Image (tube, rainbow, N blue to C red):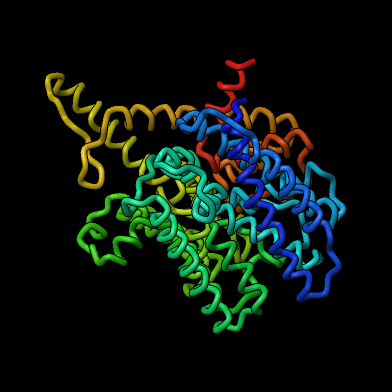
């Protein structure tokens, strides 16, 4: 591994060590004597400091380097973040790693049946991992400390940010990150205040807001959001939807470019899928609820599933098979590129359908030449090829994970739901009592699947290919 990569990893670990100190504020407030975060933070900082002093003649950062740095960073933060969980809860390291990977990848699948029994500091750490992972660890580090003095650092952002493409909102990359984080913090703070007004306990409001922002799903309660007030449930519903929108849309609203907002194809498809799912769930659940409860459950569950958040307010197993099949579909697709959501992304879905439509037209009219446009711009053939390759890899990895988790000999529905909910970073699932029923092998496979799904495959593939070439 070249020294430049190790140097960058060192800077990431230094920044990460500072984040490890933040849960100590919770331990002081609630008078919980926890020292694991401090010890691990110091060790992480010293390792990062040592790596950052590595001398290297290479100055330029290439796309391959960016993929390796991002993949290693996400793996390391999950491995390190598991230690406080293991030490303070007494679970084994594999379970702690599963929980940490689920936290940072904003999946929300948990091995804890009764989270309310955990220390407040650990509860905070679980949702704080969501909050960090939502916008991305590398994005945070790039916003705080300069990783590169030129725009080659875009390779890092592109490797980490979810969606088919990443572009700068303004000429300066650092200013772009400030805008993105400004929007991120503002929406989180507004939800936090709204939940307090809706009579949700302040600590719970903070955790739920961080979980919603990262589209995670860890709740301080075993009942998730079911026991909160009616107003709180609607607030969470609305903000889950909002965090599923491409953050570029919010930037366009800030600069008052409403014309571009209303023309956004991705936003239209996202809203269309959302409303169709709501109608489907309302109609199919009227025999279980009155109209008011059916509407609330439909909106809440749709927001949770389509944004890969994973909060719940009741038993999602009440929906018939046709709804479950559709829910699995929107779980995989998820929301918009450039949001904090996991999944395949609406933008890719639109490109795939447009590409299929063009291929059919070519069969009917072989001599026709048609360009594909998206968001009023011509799409390069390379982007279409990459999107098709991504779809193949996406489902190939799903198949591999299904085979590995299938070795546990659980039912087919439990196996499919476990793999889909972890790989798509959703956290909400059918029929699974808890993830403690799976073997260590399955938990490790699903943990890695969560990281691969969050980083959208290519960074991890590039990392593996590079390792094989150098071995």
Q: Assign the C terminus to one quadrant of the image.
A: top right
Is residue 365 rendered to the left or right of residue 89?
A: left
Is residue 86 rendered to the left or right of residue 272?
A: right
Name the residue: 41% across, 42% down.
150
Is residue 128 rendered to the left or right of residue 163?
A: right
Task: Please state the total of marks drawn on the protein image.
Answer: 0
Residue 238: image location, x then y, percent: 46, 68
Q: Quadrant of residue 73?
A: top right
Image vertical order of residue 27 relative to residue 465, above or below: below
Looking at the image, the residue that sits furthest to the left is: 367
Image vertical order of residue 65 relative to residue 375, above or below: above
Name the residue: 44% across, 32% down.
391
Image vertical order of residue 313 relative to residue 365, above or below: below
Name the residue: 84% across, 50% down.
91
Q: Assign the N terminus to one quadrant of the image.
A: top right
* 76, 88: nearer the viewer: 76
Residue 218: image location, x then y, percent: 65, 59
Residue 439: image location, x then y, percent: 78, 37
Residue 344: image location, x then y, percent: 45, 41
Is residue 295 rendered to the left or right of residue 419?
A: left
Name the residue: 43% across, 58% down.
180
Q: Quadrant of residue 75?
A: top right
Query: Is residue 397 visible from the viewing direction of this image?
Result: no
Query: Is residue 202 visible from the viewing direction of this image?
Result: yes
Q: Quadrant of residue 210?
A: bottom right
């Amino acid at each position: 591994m070249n020294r430049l990569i190790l140097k960058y990893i060192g800077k990431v670990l230094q920044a990460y060590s500072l984040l490890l100190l933040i849960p100590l504020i919770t331990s002081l407030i609630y008078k919980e004597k926890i020292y694991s975060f401090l010890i691990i933070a110091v060790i992480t900082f010293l390792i990062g400091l040592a790596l950052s002093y590595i001398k290297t003649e290479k100055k330029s950062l290439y796309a391959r380097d960016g993929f390796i740095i991002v993949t290693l960073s996400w793996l390391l933060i999950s491995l390190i973040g598991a230690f406080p969980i293991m030490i303070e809860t007494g679970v084994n390291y594999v379970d702690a790693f599963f929980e940490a990977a689920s936290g940072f990848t904003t999946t929300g699948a948990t091995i804890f049946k009764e989270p309310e029994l955990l220390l407040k500091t650990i509860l905070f750490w679980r949702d704080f991992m969501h909050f960090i992972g939502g916008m991305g660890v590398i994005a945070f580090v790039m916003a705080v400390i300069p990783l590169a003095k030129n725009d080659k650092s875009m390779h890092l952002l592109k490797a980490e940010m979810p969606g088919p493409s990443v572009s700068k909102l303004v000429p300066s990359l650092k200013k772009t990150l400030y805008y993105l984080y400004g929007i991120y913090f503002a929406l989180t703070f507004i939800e936090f205040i709204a939940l307090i007004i809706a009579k949700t306990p302040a600590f719970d409001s903070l955790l739920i807001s961080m979980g919603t922002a990262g589209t995670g799903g860890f709740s301080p309660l075993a009942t998730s959001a079911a026991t909160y007030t009616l107003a709180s449930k609607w607030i969470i519903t609305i903000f889950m939807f909002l965090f599923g929108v491409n953050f570029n849309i919010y930037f366009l609203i800030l600069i008052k470019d409403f014309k571009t907002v209303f023309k956004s194809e991705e936003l239209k498809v996202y809203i269309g899928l959302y409303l169709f799912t709501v109608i489907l769930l309302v109609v199919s659940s009227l025999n279980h609820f009155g109209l008011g409860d059916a509407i609330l459950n439909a909106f809440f569950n749709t927001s949770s599933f389509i944004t890969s958040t994973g909060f719940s307010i009741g038993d999602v197993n009440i929906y018939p098979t046709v709804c479950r099949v559709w829910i699995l579909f929107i779980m995989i697709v998820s929301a918009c590129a450039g949001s904090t959501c996991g999944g395949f992304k609406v933008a890719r879905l639109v490109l795939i359908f447009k590409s299929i439509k063009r291929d059919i037209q070519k069969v009917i009219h072989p001599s026709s030449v048609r360009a594909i446009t998206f968001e009023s711009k011509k799409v390069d053939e390379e982007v279409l090829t990459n999107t098709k390759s991504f779809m193949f890899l996406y489902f190939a990895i799903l198949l591999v994970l299904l085979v590995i988790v299938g070795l546990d000999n659980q039912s087919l529905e439990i196996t499919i739901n476990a793999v889909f909910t972890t790989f798509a970073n959703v956290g909400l699932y059918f029929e699974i009592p808890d993830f403690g029923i799976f073997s260590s092998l399955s938990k490790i496979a699903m943990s890695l699947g969560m990281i691969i799904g969050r980083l959208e495959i290519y960074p991890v593939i590039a990392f593996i290919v590079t390792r094989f070439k150098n071995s």
